[in-house]
Image (cartoon, rainbow, N blue to C red):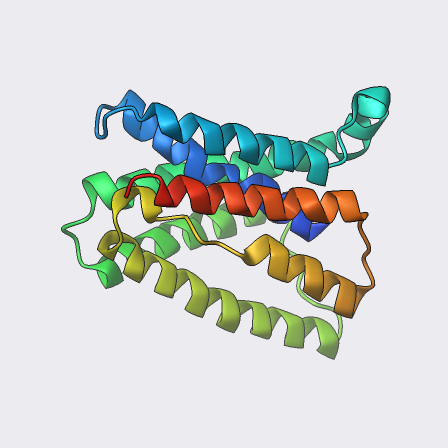
Amino acid sequence: MYSAVARIPPALALLVFQTSPMLYVLVSWAMRKEPPRWRALAPMALGLAGLALALDLRLEHLQSRWSEIGAGVLWAFASGSSMAVVYYLNTHVLKALDGRVRTFAMTAVTATLVILGGAATHAIVFPADASGWIGLACLTVFYGLAIISLFFVLPKLPSTHTAALNIEPIALLFLAWLILGNTVSPLQVGGAFLTVGAIVWLGLSKR
């Protein structure tokens, strides 16, 4: 995800990440943990259509647009695919394990791999000024609280609802406009709402 937001606007990266609920459903079907539900295909198709609008992937300039955002989109999709696996493991494999233990193990393994990989490639660069350190501290606190809360509640939710009702991309569109001055077209905003709405529909379709 960090590689994605370094290449494309964060809100667009999060929208691509929203493919994770769809991928989770498909993985659950493929692994025969849940029976296929054909009515779930409609919100999936709608979500992909909304994503195409949000990314501004129109046929007349598809090649040039993809050359501009393609790398970031692929990084974000890889992030969504990874999260789909996390959803699957939390729901179908590790549900009986205490959420605190599960979260600690996941974050500890991730931290170890990132530190070792960064050190091996000399890619670890510390902030150069006070603003950078404040940003790093805020990232650590807010992301830490968010991810701990997420993994704590995931097993308590019905399986296909684990990633539904996620308004991160919409909130980020607003924050990016308010704080960073990022702007997107009305069509892209509509696509963002369409994608998030489709994810909500996907989650509710099991009821």
Identify whether 71 is placed above or below 127: above
- Give 162 or 135, whichever is nearer the viewer: 162
| In the image, residue 148 above or below residue 118 | below
Relative image position of residue 165 (x, y in whole percent) = 44, 53
Residue at the (69%, 57%) spot, across then down:
173
At horizontal 69% and vertical 46% (from top left) the residue drawn is 190
Quarter of the image with the C terminus is: top left
Q: Position of residue 31 (x, y in %)?
A: 26, 24
Q: Left of 195 or right of it: where is 87?
A: left
Q: Is residue 94 above or below residue 34?
A: below
* Residue 120 appears in the picture as rendered: no
Relative to residue 26, is residue 44 drawn left or right? right
Q: Position of residue 108 (x, y in %)?
A: 36, 56
Report the label total.
Answer: 0
Position of 108 with respect to 157 (left or right) is: right
Q: Is residue 113 visible?
A: yes
Point 47% across, 28% down: residue: 42
Percent coordinates x, y for residue 66 in the rendering: 77, 27
Between 140 and 115, the one nearer to me in the picture = 140
